[in-house]
Amino acid sequence: MAAKKRILTACVRLFIERGYNGTTVAEIIKEADVSASSFQNIFRSKDGVLSELAAFMFAGQFKAARTVAGPDDSPAMLYAIETALQLTITELNDNLRDIYVEVYSHEATMEYIYQSTTAELYRIFGSYLPDYTESDFYELEIGSAGIMRGYMSRGCDMYFTLERKLERFLSMSLGVYNVPEDERRRIIDHILELDMRAIATSVLHELVQMLADHFDFAFDDEIESALVQ
């Protein structure tokens, strides 16, 4: 367990500072002060670390979205807040974008997203698609996750602003789940009224603190300074 803790601590730090693709297994082993065989026995590869971190972070994102949503907000609004948070977090710095895009690219982490999100989508959007089963929502999630990955991978600029990205994504994804146009417009308008960058920055710090508490490592100034560039 001590070796696993050191590996996770090293990976959180290195992934935030250098990105997932910018971090090598050799660097993780050196930072964590473990042998190559210990790393392989515990996680097998970087993908194994990513899977464990992704599972924890996605659970934390839904929890964070519930704190942002108002008590009278609809489940569809909660979905919009959670997905808008993900997209906005990837705009805080390119290393975070790299981490999230990889989560949405690897087979193991993608299957985790499909499986864990399907039941939530069925609960949120079942009334909009009353003839659909959870299997149908699993298939829809494959498509909506692909849309999410596409929008995450393309950074914002002076023309394709964060606001335009959120509006385009939510318009398409809520449409996939048959949310009526007038309700989609109300949800999107509400999201665009929020200071999503400030909210995402706060949520990101909460997520990293939750990781630190769960895996028992220090959320120090070095990690703090690397979060938002």
Image: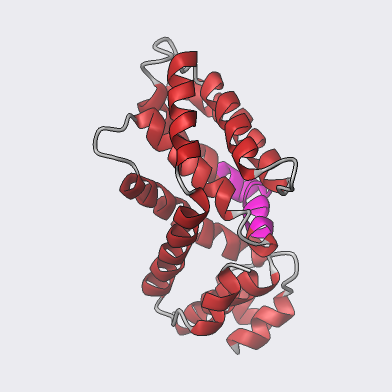
Q: Is residue 222 a member of the stretch shown in magenta?
A: no
Q: Position of residue 144 (x, y in %)?
A: 59, 31
User: Is 134 in front, or is 90?
Assistant: 90
Q: Is residue 104 a member of the stretch shown in magenta?
A: yes
User: Is 228 in front, or is 141?
Assistant: 228
Q: Position of residue 108 (x, y in %)?
A: 61, 49
Position of residue 228 in the picture relative to residue 205 (left or right): right
Q: Position of residue 123 (x, y in %)?
A: 35, 28
Instruction: Identify the residue at horizontal 43%, vertical 51% (top origin).
Output: 61
Q: Quadrant of the N terminus?
A: bottom left
Q: Is residue 129 above or below residue 211?
A: above
Q: Is residue 121 visible?
A: yes
**Chief secondary structure of the magenta portion:** helix
Instruction: Identify the residue at horizontal 64%, vertical 36% (top origin).
Output: 164
User: Is 77 in front, or is 60?
Assistant: 77
Q: Quadrant of residue 33?
A: bottom right
Q: Which residues are magenta?
A: 97-111
Instruction: Identify the residue at horizontal 68%, vertical 40% (top origin).
Output: 151
Q: Is residue 153 above or below residue 4?
A: above
Position of residue 221 in the picture relative to residue 145 (left or right): left
Q: Quadrant of residue 81?
A: top left
Q: Quadrant of residue 176?
A: top right
Q: Is residue 116 visible?
A: no
Q: Is residue 161 above or below residue 126?
A: below
